[in-house]
Amino acid sequence: MKVVGITTQQEVFVGSKERNFRINEFLIIEDPYQGSLLGEVVEAKTFNRYIPLNIYGDFVDSSVLESLKALGYNIDEDTIYIAKIRLLNEALYPIQTGSDVRLPQFLEVKDLMIKSRVDEGLVLGIIKNTDDLAKDMDDEFKDLLHTFEEGDLLEQRDIPYILDIKSMHHYPHIGVFGGSGSGKSFGLRVILEELMRLNIPTIVLDPHFEMDFSQPASYLDDEAIDFKNRFKCLQVGTHVGVKFEDLTAQDLKNLLSAASNLTDSMSNVVDILFKPKDSYYSFYNRMQMLTEAQEEGSLDRIENRINNAADPEERRAWMERKELFISYDKTCPYNSVRGIIWRLRRLENDGVFSKDIREIEDGLQNGKLIVIQGNTRILQVFSTYLLNNLYHKRREYKDALYKKTEADYFPPFIIVTDEAHNFAPKAYESPSKSIIKEISQEGRKYGVFLILATQRPTLLDETITAQLNTKLIFRTVRASDIQTIQEETDLTMEECRRLPYLRTGDVFISSADMGRTIFARIRAALTTSPHTLNPFDELKSKFKEDDEDFLKLIMDKLPINDIELAQLALEIEQEAKITYTVNQLEEKLNKLVEKKHIKKEETIFGFRYNI
Amino acid sequence: MYNINDKLKEKVEDLNQALRVKYRDIFELDKGQLRDFINKHIGQIKKMDKLDRAQLSLYQSKGGIVGVDGSVNKVGGAYPHFIEIYQAMAKCTNRREDPVVLADIYSPLYIEEEEMEEDDDLFQNKRDVKLATLEVEAAIESVKRHKPYAILMDGGLIRYNIDAHDSWLELRGLCEERGTIIVGVIKDIKTSIIGDMIRELDGKINSTIYDREILFGLLDYGEMVLVKDEANKKGPQGYASVFLRSSLAPTVIGMDIIDSQRDKLEEMAQLVFTLTPENSRGVPLWLDIVDKEVLISDELIRSLLEQYMDRGLYERFFISERDKRN
Ligand SMILES: Nc1ncnc2c1ncn2[C@@H]1O[C@H](COP(=O)(O)OP(=O)(O)OP(=O)(O)O)[C@@H](O)[C@H]1O
Ligand SMILES: [Mg+2]
């Protein structure tokens, strides 16, 4: 390998007759005047001067090439390989053309590639195209993982990519971007497995009900770590919820506005009607009674109700309504109160108020990964409350430490969510967005970090995007998202151009602490999502089951003449308590014929089904 | 708009008219008639088959096929202030890394006084001689070193007979002795065998009409004409030749072979046909590859001269005004 052509201080071309280059691999240029310079392949090309279009403007037909090969000459060997190399550090002078180029030793690149020890960082995958370097790699970095490619589980042959979680202290927050099917969720799963391995307290918002870690991946035999004691799936309304008594007016307003914004007047209603230590029922009743009074329309009519009350109980109730009417009718318009009631009842129906978050807090205290499940709307509501709550607990603890006052310990933690653009949308305000934004800007100080994944970086709030110091970028096809990625990361033009073509699970990792982009492949996850069955396989197996059941029913009745179908229906009904019409039976039988389970013969009496 | 000079237009029209008149008789003959004539008087039109893999592998095991070609680079200005650099290469399909490469150099300034000749024709001749000799010598070396089954020379063998007579005799002898087949592949055929025959038998034509003109589009893809000896009376003795259409382009190429190997001519025509891409001008790819490889870029030559000649000498003698301008 040699440097060829015109060079600069930043970039050179390297040519080789034997070795095909791979993008993102590292090479060392031995400049006779400047010593060894490390560079990375940013473009790789091959060229065969005999095969290109320029043999009088046309392709050479392959039969001629085959013939030459039979004569002993393989034209493929005339291929030369050319790579564009970008130097990691600018050279003082343009590189000497003709300089030798060689592969680095592991030690020469170790500091660039590995930033963390295995027991302190997230082992997410391999750095692609580093197998040559990995040969003399320290044993501690070998055999850490497998990759899963084209249906095969492969041994680790490259340098591992270990995300230095400690560097989050300086470069907080991670973004995970990529189009549908690009490997985001899978990548997130690997990140979460690693967080569990390191016992880092983590909250996962899981709108897809996919972040369960109890099922080992099918391609692994048994080496799987058992994560069962390291995570917990909690469903909003079933296992966890909001303890109404603990809410502040602001919390409540956040909850109520999570699905859609409150009007000023509605917000006012909460401020006026909600009293500290209110229970769901006390608050609900207060509003209910106020609206009932307002429905009467005037004080006179309420008096009337009091005077005509059938019993003392009713009388007392109307007196109460009167008090509320006098205090609040002017400041709390009827429609706004109805709006709050309606929203409150909806939350209650979802079970939001039926539990508390104790289990979550306990889990975090024990270094567990807590997966909060629920549909997107519920999660928006609940996470707003939850994140505010947890973040402020942590904050209080740290502030108290600083002020040297007493406070309960609350650990640092990481918040992870898929579909992050739903929780922190760019286009409009939402309560979950304000807490996420706050954490993105100040979480670092308190040790609270975000890992946000989304298909649509363009729809994610820009202030938050800008705070994501490490970005994992999977295959992205949509032009607007590539544009956003180009603006928000240090991916080069060449890298952005490759984005639509990345294979599932391949990823550019652009991180402030690396100072450059790494091309990696996410390792094989140790666990699998609970619903990975292909829907078409599901259909097929469902049909198969149905067919088999039916086959069992009729097997010992074969052969069956088509004029006996009514009789057959009767028999099946008596024996198996399943009712078929003659038409249904005929259809089912024909389907079995089609699938070649049975035969249909023609006889003088018509058709006959047989084995 | 770009205006073409009217005089120029007229001249082109005149040329067109002259060609029309000259070739009227030929154009009037229909394709069938011409092909009949050729079949009868020149040689049979035959369909060629491409060689199969087994046959080619056999050649490979018998030493492979050598392609021989040469190149000329000229640096400098008008006579005598220039240098010509000649290179010849003989490359064997079996021996990728081991081609025979010979080089020579010529500058009128470097020749002894009495030899100095300003005659351009003579110079042209000198260049032909140098190049042909170099190519033949490369072929000789190749026969000895590569021991190939056959050699494809880029150009007719007759040319070597004329321009490099002594070396050619050596090469020819060597090939005959070793049983190495040697053929010349002629991209631009310059003969007029068919036209001459028509003139002789018919008398209608009274000017020279070249074979390439007649054969253009006349043969179908994969057809050849093995020229009978009687038809080629005018040609030099001791060679047999063939015309063939080896690609989809309507042009026809020629090949020649030494007398003693004439029974191999058809087989060699098939080999050339097999090695020629259908969408090419008709030259076998192997010769194209050798042609590309023997070529030296002008840049490379200039840097060679700059590095190995005194700057002063180089500039004084070989940098023309035109070079200085750019
Ligand atoms: N690193 C990887 N190695 C092997 N297979 C992978 C990898 N990443 C993803 N896959 C496979 O590709 C499929 C799609 O990946 P994944 O579900 O992560 O896509 P996604 O980016 O989350 O898509 P969506 O945005 O639609 O949810 C998965 O079923 C998984 O089996
Ligand atoms: Mg997903």
Image (cartoon, coloured by chain):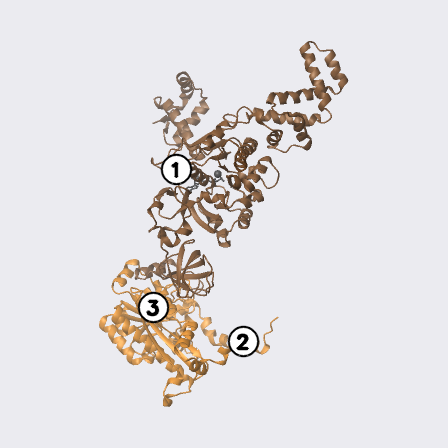
Q: What is the three-letter code of the residue carrying label 1? A: Leu
Would residue A182 be seen by someone viewing this image from the given angle? yes
Do marks 2 and 1 share a chain? Answer: no
Mark 3 sits on what residue? B44
Asked whether mark 2 and ligand 1 are closer than 8 Å, the reply comes as no
Position of B165 compared to A203: left or right? left
Position of A533 compared to B169: left or right? right
Q: Is residue A30 above or below residue B103?
A: above
Q: What is the three-letter code of the residue carrying label 3? A: Gln
The chain coloured orange in the image? B
Residue furthest left in the image: B177
Mark nearer the viewer, 3 or 1:
1
Asked whether mark 3 and ligand 1 are closer than 8 Å, the reply comes as no
Position of B190 compared to A270: left or right? left
Disc 1 on helix, strand or loop? Answer: loop
Mark 1 sits on what residue? A526
- Mark 2–mark 1 Cα distance, whole angstroms, equals 81 Å
- Percent x, y for residue A1? 37, 61
Give the quarter of the figure containing the C terminus of chain A: top left
Would residue A177 be seen by someone viewing this image from the given angle? no
Q: Numbered disc 2: what chain?
A: B
Q: Quadrant of residue B92?
A: bottom left
Q: Colour of chain A?
A: brown
